[in-house]
Image: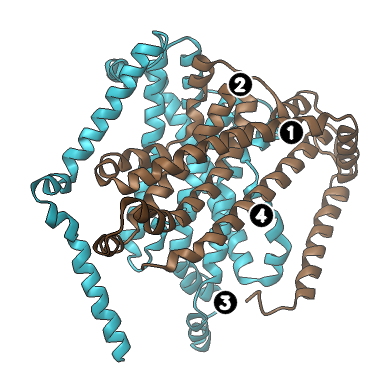
Chain colours: A cyan, B brown
Amino acid sequence: MIRQQAAGSGRALALLGRGRSAEACRQGPWARLVNATLPLKIAGGVFLLAISELAVRLFAPAYVSRPTGVFRVLPQTLSNPAVLSGAATTLGAVLEGTVIALISGMAIGLAMGRIKLVDRLLRLYVDGLSAMPMVAIVPLFTIWLGFTSWARLATVVFAAFFPIAINMSSGARSVPQGYLEVARSCGASAWHVLFGVTLPASMPYLLSGMRLALGRALVGAVVAEFYVAIDGLGYFILFQTRTFHHNEAFVAVLLLAGVAVGVDALMNWCIHRYMPWYRTGERTR
Amino acid sequence: MLSSDSRWARWTTVAVSVLSGAALWEFGTRGMSPAVMAPLSATVLRLVEMVRSGELGASAVQSLALFLTGLSLAVLTALPLGLLLARVRVLRVALDDYIALVYAMPMVALIPFILSIFGLDFGAKALVVFLFCFFPVLYNTVEGARSIDPQLIEVARSFRSGERAIWRDVMIPGAFPYAMTGVRQAIGRGLMGMVVAEFFLSASGLGQLLMISARNFDTAGLFGVVLIITLLGAGLMAAGQALENRFTAWRGVGR
């Protein structure tokens, strides 16, 4: 009890110290300026843009994209129907594939997490295939499915499946034994235990699996478009760079990056908002 | 849950898992056309053939050289840069959001640019692997540095530590475990970069083998190479995990 209190007050002190570090207080106006982080961040961004602009102007051929060039073509590229339809097909494939992977991955992951035999039989394959660089599977999909959009969908499913299955299984395994025992002793059916207890309790794991899965799915879709040469945002980038329209292509890259960052932020927000007790997801990637 | 079993039981189930997987692959694919599906025995025979002809060995060496060049360059530059950002608060605050942004961005989208600007020789491919590996290491090192308790540095200061001593005793030990998480991620991404670079820049190594066997409908060869890449990936990822685990013991300090 006493030790707990001591630890508590120690933490309070640490928090006080962290709120405004002594170093910052000592250093006066300069430190206070530095502590106002937003101008600094903006300055950092401007600096990076200026550096890349300068480097491209000095050292690279004229067709290479540079910040001012990208900025100039931004409106017309974003209203270009080829970009819009490409983005729609790529994101559509990513969503469709991720939903398929989510359903199958949850089923396999739950089985692996709750049934020891299933885990023993599948663990080796799931871990092995998730460690493999997933793009290596694309040539196989082109044999099976041809050079079609099915190959892209299959790549997306393959990319998204493993993080979901693995995170689902560790989530299902981490459900406190007490919850399950209470539910069973109150006469809950196996179905009810699964959907009423196990699944909600492993939600945070599933969400961080989803975040990984969506990131990988996006990469998988772009690689498949490069390899198979089917319409989409990835193919738009490939085509524009080949015809030396780097600025237009870079707008598409920014679009992809925006989607990736947006998905990341959305998942983080979900974890923060709905599962505030689970914060480790910010660090484990 | 799983740890309650004896070692013997664990190995038995692993053996059963491997054997049933192999049996499924061998006998489940029997009636299918060899262009679509190759049974295990055909795959193994084809692999032996590829090893004998030296094709597989040469490709694997080529790929690994590419991978290791990119990875080591990335680690050698991202680690010092990350530590610098960690120590110099102004730089870190100014740049860390942009690092996180690029870290989250799908790097494959840059490959057409690299192809068109830098050509398709070994250097351009190493650049691809480098770009895939650089940001995970940088991001995690900066992230680790952010987790260093400022009090530690203040205490070191008040004991009159010099800049060098602060680096040696606080900064590097504090950020290193996180940097190792970055290295593990970089291994995974770098493998992907390796295959992608070999696909889309000049074809070489294991990526070229994959493409050639796919183009010739040599499904047995394709399965063989995919198997080798999977084993390579699993081995390298396990090495990265071991590296990370070796250093995560430090993380508890200073919290």
Residue depicted at x 36% and y 35%: A258
Q: Residues within 10 Å of mark 3 (few under 14, many from 20)?
A: few
Mark 2 lies on residue:
B201
Mark 4 lies on residue:
A126
**Numbered label attached to residue B61:** 1
Q: Position of residue B76 (x, y in %)?
A: 50, 39
The kind of residue on which mark 1 rests is Val
- Whether callout 2 and callout 4 share a subunit is answered no
Sequence-first tag of 3 and 4:
4
Closer to the observer: label 3 or label 4?
4
Mark 3 lies on residue:
A190
Q: Secondary structure at mark 2?
A: loop
Closer to the observer: label 3 or label 2?
2
Report, in whole angstroms, how far the alpha carbon at label 2 lies from the one at label 4.
30 Å
Report, in whole angstroms, how far the alpha carbon at label 1 lies from the one at label 2.
18 Å
The kind of residue on which mark 2 rests is Leu
Mark 4, chain letter? Answer: A
Q: Secondary structure at mark 3?
A: helix
Is residue A277 toward the left or the right of residue B212 in the image? left
Residue depicted at x 37% and y 42%: B100
Q: Residues within 10 Å of mark 1 (few under 14, many from 20)?
A: few
